[in-house]
Amino acid sequence: MQEGIHVTAQRFGPLIACLVVCFVGCRPADPGVVTIVSSLPRTGSAKQQSDTIVGGIRMAIEEAGGQVGPFRVEYLDLDDSTAAAGQWTSEAEAANARRALQDPDVVAYIGTFNSGAAKVSMPILNLGDLLMVSPANTAVGLTKPGLGAPGEPNVYRPTGRLNYTRVVPADDLQGPLSADWAKKRGVKKVYILDDSEVYGKGIADLFDERCREIGIEVLGHDSIDAKAQEFKSLMASVKAAGPDLVYFGGTTQSKGGQLAKDMASAGIQAMFMVPDGCREQVFIDSAGAGNLEGRCFVTFGGLPPEKLTGKGAEFVERYQKKHGELPEAYAVYGYEAACVALRAIRDAGVKDRRAISDAALALKDFDGALGRWGFDKNGDTTMQTLTVSAVRGGKFEFEEVLDANAVGEGGSGSDTAR
């Protein structure tokens, strides 16, 4: 499959190049301007999270004085969701990617929030070598050969070149480490649910696999219909199985809160564990804080805002001063993604998409708000910090840092919070 993709790229390379020239030739470029685009769900249930990501992006550009090298920086905030759908759609994301590709001033694309949306825009942007920096994608198949579906990630690289990067750790860490954490907490039996989407099912499958490796019994693994209004009959089956923990691979938008509410209504006493797609205040609000109190745990790729140090802590302080509230967990990733784009433009020194993508991929010792890190050969961050938080008092409360070195050792491990 991979070889076939490479041959296809070689065969149609001239046509691709011609199409790209047509795309960017729609209007003359402004030699003194570079535009950074973001494509995020700005409508519907993910709006609160994307608001803070955009806030982080704007702060990075403002702190740079709206200038990088000889270029004035403009920012375009695009919505990949629709009011009708209440979430991202393939049509909206594809339209955003084409719009960015056709604008000769656009040199960086910050997005997407959802891994499924990335699958839509990645091959489009790759045709024009347009740098893509995701603040939130975690699906393994986007970048890691052999860990995703057949043909991934080459299917997203029709030119055979890389232009995609992400500043968050992928799910090949988050899924297994969640199972390791459960083992450490004495969990012997789990019931796994997922939302059937790229991100949710992917991380649930990794959690499932790791549970079986380390001796946790998987009582069941079901996919839900995220369009359903409630899951009471499903929860009756879950309760009858008698799990110590229910794990949901999904997001707030794919009914994480409703599942927690229905668990409580069914009288299920098990712990409830969710991934970073639910680490937002709206998840707690939708579930009802009382239904989560002391029993819900959420994993996250990196430190929560209140635990950041150095430049990260300085960002949180500036954000609070500007917006009057603590940023949501992904705000700093929006900020870091924008800082990466600005640094790549500066390092390239020219308004050339391929040069800017190469400059970003070459970052190996980036001193940013997330600490000191770089990109590996796949465009993945070298940062491997993952954390667990509990819901207490209607808020997320930091619990501990997970040990990424434990994955693959056949056991569990974590570093207690310091």
Image: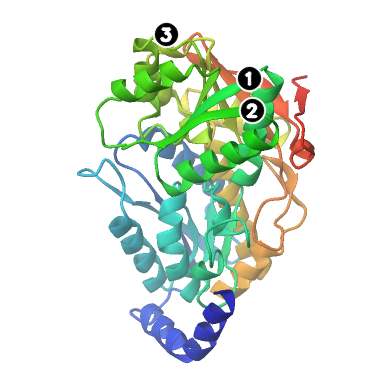
> Whole-percent x and y of residue 28?
38, 79
Question: Residue placed at 34% from the left, 62% from the top?
Answer: 94
Residue at left 33%, top 34%?
A: 45
- Give the image quarter of residue 118: bottom left
Return the residue at label 2: 216
Position of residue 276 relative to residue 89, above or below, is: above
Between disc 1 and disc 2, whose residue precedes? 1
How far is mark 2 from mark 3, CA to CA?
A: 28 Å
Which mark lies nearer to you, 2 or 3? 2
Q: Is residue 30 visible?
A: yes
Dot 1 crowding, Cα within 10 Å, few <14, some 14–19, many 20+? many
Foreground of the two, 99 or 106: 99
Quarter the N terminus occupies:
bottom right
Q: Are marks 3 and 1 in contact (CB under 8 Å)?
A: no
Seen at 42% across and 17% down, the residue is: 240
Label 3 SS: helix
Which quadrant of the figure contains the C terminus?
top right
- Assign a secondary structure to mark 2: loop
Contact, mark 1 vs mark 2 (Cβ under 8 Å): yes
Observer-side mark, 3 or 1, equals: 1
Q: Which amino acid type is marked by label 3?
A: Gly
Residue behind mark 3: 290
Placement of 346 over or under 336, stated as above or below: below
